[in-house]
Amino acid sequence: MLNPAGYQARLKDAMYPTLGIVGVLACWHFAIVVFAVPEYVLPTPLQTATHFFGSIGKLVPHALVTIYETLAGLLLAIAFSTVLAALIVWFRPVERLTMPVVVLLQTTPKIAVAPLFLIWFGMGFMPKIVISFWLAYFPILISMITGLRDVQPEMVELSRSMSASKLSTFLKVRLPNSLPHFFSGLKLAGIVALLGAVLGEYFGADKGLGYLIMWANGSYDVKLLFSIVIALVLIGRAIYFAIVLIERFAISWHVSTREGGELFHA
C-alpha cells in the first residue's frame, strides 16, 4: 500500500488540474455575463451540465455504438500492428516492402477517403471500424518497432552466449522490452480510434455520437452539441485511464509505472 505521504502527494498533484478546470469554468461563466452572450449561442456551464444530465437517456444509446466501433477498430489495430511490427523487425525485406505503403496510407487525407468507405462497406458498423482502425494502427506500429529494436546489445549477446535461439531471444528479450513503447503508442491510438469512429459516423450513419453531432448541428441545438462534447471527453478519458491501468499491471516492473517511488501494486 502507498504510505500517507504518497496519498498527500497525489492529492496535491490533483489540485492543479482541478484549479485549472475551475478557472476555465469561471472565465466561461463571467464572459457570458459580461458580454451578454445569448443562451442559444453559448450556454453557461451550469446550463450545459444541466442539459447534459437531462440528455443522458438520449446520449447513452449513441455513445454505446461509438464505443463499440472505437474498441473494435482499436483491437484490430493492436492485432495488425503487433504482427506487422514483429515481421518488420524479424525480416528486413518485410520492412522495405511494407513501410513505404504504411507511410503512404498514414499521410493520405482521411477526410477525403472516408466517404469511399461508406460507398464500399455501406452505412453499417464496418466503415466506422475501418476508419477507426486506420487512424489507430500507425502509432502502435511505430512504437512497437521502436521497442523491439531498442534493446541493449549486451542483452542480445548474453542470450546468444546462453545458446538461446533467435525466437527465444525475440520472445524473452525483445518482446518484453517493447511493452513500454507499445503502451505509449496505445494511449495515443485509443484517442485517435475514437476520433475515427466519430469521423465515420459524421459522414454517414443513423446512430452514434457523430451522427448525433450532425443532427444537433442541423437543428442549431448548441446545448446538445456541448453535451455530446462532454460525452466524448468522458469516453476518451475512460479509454485512456483503462489503458493506463492495464499498463501498470502488465509492466509493473518498468520505471514508467512507478508512482512516488513505489510500484503500483506495492
Image: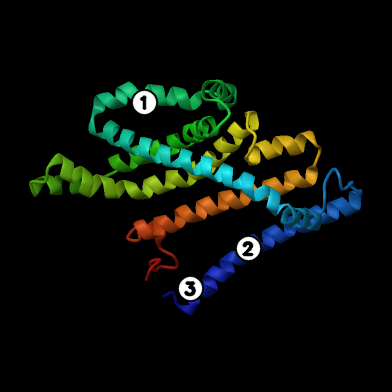
| Alpha carbon separation for disc pair 1 and 2 | 42 Å
Three-letter residue code for mark 3: Gly
> Which element is circle 1 on?
helix
| Alpha carbon separation for disc pair 1 and 3 | 45 Å
Three-letter residue code for mark 1: Met
Q: Indicate the colouring scheme.
A: rainbow
Q: Are marks 1 and 2 in contact (CB under 8 Å)?
A: no
Tell me if 156 is positioned left or right of 13 in this view: left
Extreme residue in the bottom direction: 4
- The dot on residue 99 is 1
Residue 97 at x, y percent in the picture = 31, 21
| Alpha carbon separation for disc pair 2 and 3 | 16 Å
The residue mark sitting in front, 1 or 3, is 1
Residue at the location (27% across, 32% down)? Answer: 87
Tell me if 49 is positioned left or right of 60 in this view: right
Indicate the quadrant where residue 259 lies: bottom left
For the C terminus, the quadrant is: bottom left
Three-letter residue code for mark 2: Tyr
Q: Residues within 10 Å of mark 3 (few under 14, many from 20)?
A: some
**Nearer to us in this view, 44 or 143:** 44
Residue that mark 2 sits on: 16
Residue that mark 3 sits on: 6
Above or below residue 236? Residue 87 is above
